Amino acid sequence: MGVSSNESLANLLKEERRFAPPAELAAAANVTAEAYKKAAADRLEFWATQARRLTWDIAPTETLDWSNPPFAKWFADGKLNVAYNCVDRHVEAGHGDRVALHFEGEPGDGRTVSYAELKDEVCRAANALIELGVKAGDRVAIYLPMIPEAVIAMLACARIGAPHSVVFGGFSADALATRIADADARVVITADGGYRRGKPSALKPAVDEALTRPGTEKVRNVLVVRRTGQETAWTEGRDLWWHDLVPRQSEQHTPQAFDAEHPLFILYTSGTTGKPKGILHTTGGYLTQTSYTVHAVFDLKPETDVFWCTADVGWVTGHSYIVYGPLSNGATQVLYEGTPDTPHQGRWWEIIQKYRVSILYTAPTAIRTCMKWGEDIPAKFDLSSLRLLGSVGEPINPEAWVWYRKYIGADRTPIVDTWWQTETGAIMISPLPGVTTTKPGSAQHPLPGVAATVIDDEGNEVPNGSGGYLVLTEPWPSMLRTIWGDEQRYLDTYWSRFENRYFAGDGAKKDEDGDIWLLGRVDDVMLVSGHNISTTEVESALVSHPKVAEAAVVGAADPTTGQAIAAFVILRGSATEEEGLIEELRAHVARELGPIAKPKRILAVAELPKTRSGKIMRRLLRDVAENRQLGDVTTLTDSTVMELIQSKLPAAP
Ligand code: 6R9
């Protein structure tokens, strides 16, 4: 598996466009060029300083304990309460009237929650959990749509020291049951349903079904938010309505200080194979780095900015950049329940116009979808409030980056392409908007206090201009502490490939300036005639053709070249699969990257298989390209996509 044959990843893509930070933004940036230069000097001192952004009941005197690697302890003798840091302290500082959440429901309903209201709600929910017998250390599963109660429930758990395990609302009863069982949860917080594509979509039945499965017997109560009003089956004695239990609680709750290493949450990553991994995050280090990165990477000014991260709270991006990072900074945010095209394809841009969103954080898959729909749609809305754009989740193709800047950012806003993972907890590699001259498609530099590099098979750092594996060479505050209940798997998965270095599973290259370009998961790297070629670069070359909105590339077994490149493309709005287009695309890739990267086959398709968090599932396309039976499709957003793709295939040769 992965990059093999001691051959470094070929470095094919050349991208010459550069964008300097806007002078005005740079002058007022939270992190200026000067501060950036100073920051790197002493890593531990740097993080100790950032920890002081938080309010501690007992300030830590220790920064890092790495005496038992790779099991880190950060700020271990400090104590703090995460919910106090995200809510109460802003109210105490006189910002109780500031909007914490502009909630926008998919049907168009809405609700504004101020910091003072959020504090009352979090306290009531915390008192409700206590009434249900939840104690510090007990696990609570959260299976909710994107409504304010999701944020409130997470903070209520944090407030009483009960680690939450948020399960994405789109997951099945099976996935929910496995996660409840693995975390050994005592309470589940859910809703009757949520709105999805213009219709109520039930959630509670999946909880009922999950709780019939072995391993979930210890769940005592199910707390149910009424969102859609749909009919809901009820188990007396176990099920409780949120509106019966929570509003009658006191809005007074004294936050207890927890150890910096107290578990904050477990979040499961599905990965491509095997049982989901319960990634464990703890309190002080996690909050320090999520808080710092919102300040530094998004340049958040809490008094004036309106921040919108479009991720679901069921993913790490929602945990770190809807809940803990922004709220610990006192941000005003948009929380949107639904899909980008309900009831029309301009819904996101309408929301930006309505709330005057100034910072938008989204994923390449969403940007490419908007490219496919065409730039006329955002052009109908007033997006002039935007001053900064962010990207996360996959490598962003340079062409999608440039489109994002041009049509959403009015050719004016900086873009921060942020690399990180569920395991890293917070952003690790990213430009800084007031400092970095950006390059479309590159995440560029590790943040201050973060040590990342690219190494070859032998573990030697590659020279500039070469590719290999991305590794993190020093521990960082928001790192995962282990895999819940499986230390051995933690060691094997992340720390065994290279000694003393964290292996992220991603391929990367360093360009001539030493900037980092992410090249996709190493499991996806192709080996063509003895050359390792990154799927990302071939996809980016395809997307740089004016007729292509999105592309997915895989290596399919080939008798002469080992693997041959097979590409699946989605055409832009008006483009059709006319005569000669496929040949033109193949020639285009050869021109952009060289003949070695020319796809052997290209197929135009209507959709690509994506995980529920929007990442392309190349594994399934490899099955198609090799005429194999499809592997596990349960994590697909839409399982009909694969049938559509297969129906377009020419009969097996
Ligand atoms: C935050 C998140 C992690 C994987 C990661 C990498 C890919 C995320 C990226 C990126 C290139 C970026 N990834 N951000 N690749 N450039 N800016 O997405 O967490 O769901 O755990 O996925 O996503 O492959 O290893 P998670």
Image (cartoon, rainbow, N blue to C red):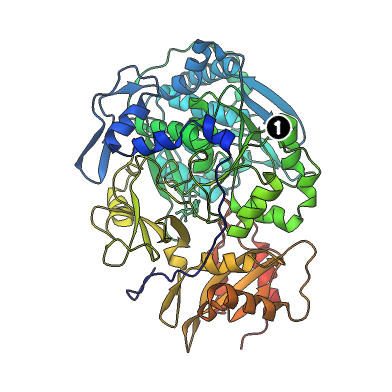
Percent position of residue 17, x then y = 57, 57
Residue bearing the label numbered 1? 104
The answer to whether residue 15 is left or right of residue 357 is: left
Observer able to see residue 412:
yes
The extreme left residue here reads: 67
- For the image, the number of numbered tags is 1
Q: Is residue 211 visible?
A: no
Q: Front-most of 120 and 422?
A: 422
Q: Quadrant of the N terminus?
A: bottom left
Q: Position of residue 440 (x, y in %)?
A: 56, 55
Secondary structure category for the residue under label 1:
strand
User: In the displayed structure, would residue 645 be above or below residue 238?
Assistant: below
Judge left or right: residue 420 versus residue 551. left
Left or right of 138? Residue 395 is right
Looking at the image, residue 502 sits to the left or right of residue 642; the answer is left
Q: Residue at x 40, y 81 (%)?
A: 530
Q: Quadrant location of the C terminus?
A: bottom right
Q: Residue 358, how many percent across, how many down? A: 64, 33
93 above or below 543?
above
Mark 1 belongs to which amino acid?
A: Glu
Residue 76 image-quadrant placement: top left
Other-residue count near label 1 (Cα within 10 Å), few / some / many at <14 / 14–19 / ≥20: many
Q: Give the residue displayed 22% in from the left and 45% down from the top.
A: 69
Q: Nearer the viewer, residue 611 or 190?
A: 611
Residue at image position (59%, 68%) is: 541
